[in-house]
Image (cartoon, rainbow, N blue to C red):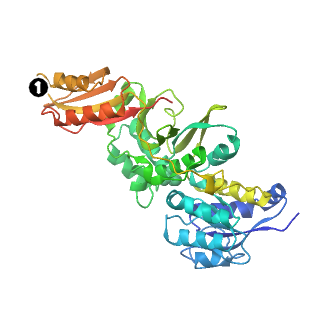
Amino acid sequence: MTHPLRLGIAGLGTVGTGVVKIIRQKANLLAERADRPVVITAVSARSRDKDRGVNLKDYAWEDDPVALATRDDVDVFVELMGGSDGPAKAATEAAIAAGKDVVTANKAMLAHHGHALAMAAEAAGRVIRFEAAVAGGIPVIKTLAEGLAGNEVTRVMGVMNGTCNYILTRMQSAGLPYDDVFEEANQLGYLEADPTLDVGGIDAGHKLSLLAAIAFGTQVDFDAVELDGIERITIDDIHQAADMGYRIKLLGVAQLTGRGLEQRMSPCLVPDTSPLGQLEGGTNMCVLEGDAVEQIVLRGPGAGEGPTASAVMGDVMDIARGFRMSVFGRPAAGLTKAKPAQAVTPAPYYLRMALEDKPGAMAKIATVLGENGVSIDRMRQYQHDGSTAPVLIVTHKVTRNDLDHALAAMDELDVMKETPVALRIETV
Ligand code: HSE
């Protein structure tokens, strides 16, 4: 056996504690697999005294993550603190400058600073690995960067925020409104400290931007992700989509076309019989498409101690075995700056609206749709008591441009009581 691989772990929350447990409990197995011991030399966290249920006394303690990251007895800086800037970024930069490899679960940091960090790491001959940053325990980065290295990747899709999938599927199974299920998720501890990161699609958008960079050889560009969250999805949307044979998912889609890079994270309808349609609870799913492989579907837990620590350990073990790869699967200096593009491929849409219940209201809607080239596939008016008629329309395929014009014109109509909701129906 060769010399041990020495880790410095910053952040001892759920994931950090899970990594410590794996390394303590599976020391022999890890050493056999890597042909060298994998050990922790030092740790760092906000509170030294907190009982985390693991024995930390064998490890040196550092209050300052930068001091931890630059210790002489640390080979790999394992960053599990989170946060796009602040201590996580400072310590990662310090680690690279001090000649350490980095393993991180920090999607926000990489979505905002991934290209600059990759350039710095590669200039220093170091690696940054981040399997745990995307889709928890699913080894999607390994699959995309290594397993599909012989493909032109054509499209990447995914449900990559377990909290949103929990909320949407729980609304459906329990028939509960959004606010009730949001509170339930809060009580269960599923929500990020800032819940907008989850329900606003930001967390999932971070993950999509990282996958897009690997898939298409582009510089990670989170600011170009078209983002829409699940806050406006009502229990009526859930029921009415189900009535039409669909499920609503917070779905990320990235593809590179002649016009540029499309990256969107938004609530979409998917067929209820499709793998994405059947995804329940906090589970994640990534769908990868390549010219040679066609389609791969990966499904698994998107968060939690064991699954996320499992992903961190996959990266640690690659480094222990001497496997080194460019941060985004090709040298950072060669990553192109993609032009952001809106999705223009025609798609069917689900339109939900509340009309004033009076003669001619429906005719006005149909006229506006027709004038803007939007053809109706299916239409339902649901039972109601008062003066407002809930109406649902599924369109034939329509371009985004035509749909936006139709929605703007509909919003102006005197019979429209609320701004209509439009959700894309995704072919998966
Ligand atoms: N808040 C995230 C989720 C955790 O719900 O999927 C993992 O990034």
Q: Is residue 24 above or below residue 360?
A: below
Tell me if 401 is positioned left or right of 118 in this view: left
Observer-nearest residue: 364 or 235?
364
Q: Which residue is mark 1?
A: 358
Task: Determine if residue 106 is in view.
Answer: no
Q: Amino acid at mark 1?
A: Lys
Observer-nearest residue: 184 or 418?
418
Tell me if 52 is positioned left or right of 146 in this view: left
Where, quadrant-wise, is the N terminus in this rendering? bottom right
Number of numbered markers: 1
Which residue: 39% across, 55% down? 196
Q: Is residue 271 above or below residue 267?
A: above
Q: Is residue 140 above or below residue 369?
A: below
> Does the numbered disc 1 mark a residue whose Cβ is under 8 Å from ligand 1?
no
Locate residue 306: give its quadrant.
Answer: bottom right
Percent x, y of residue 48? 58, 77
Which residue: 23% across, 37% down? 408
Percent x, y of residue 31? 82, 60
Task: Determine if residue 312 is in view.
Answer: yes
Q: Secondary structure at mark 1?
A: loop
Tell me if 70 is positioned left or right of 200 in this view: right
Locate residue 186: give its quadrant.
Answer: bottom left
Tell me if 247 is positioned left or right of 34 in this view: left
Percent x, y of residue 311? 65, 53
Q: Is residue 250 above or below residue 71?
A: above
Percent x, y of residue 397? 38, 25
Q: Residues within 10 Å of mark 1 (few under 14, many from 20)?
A: few
Which residue: 62% across, 79% down? 67
Locate residue 402: give its quadrant.
Answer: top left
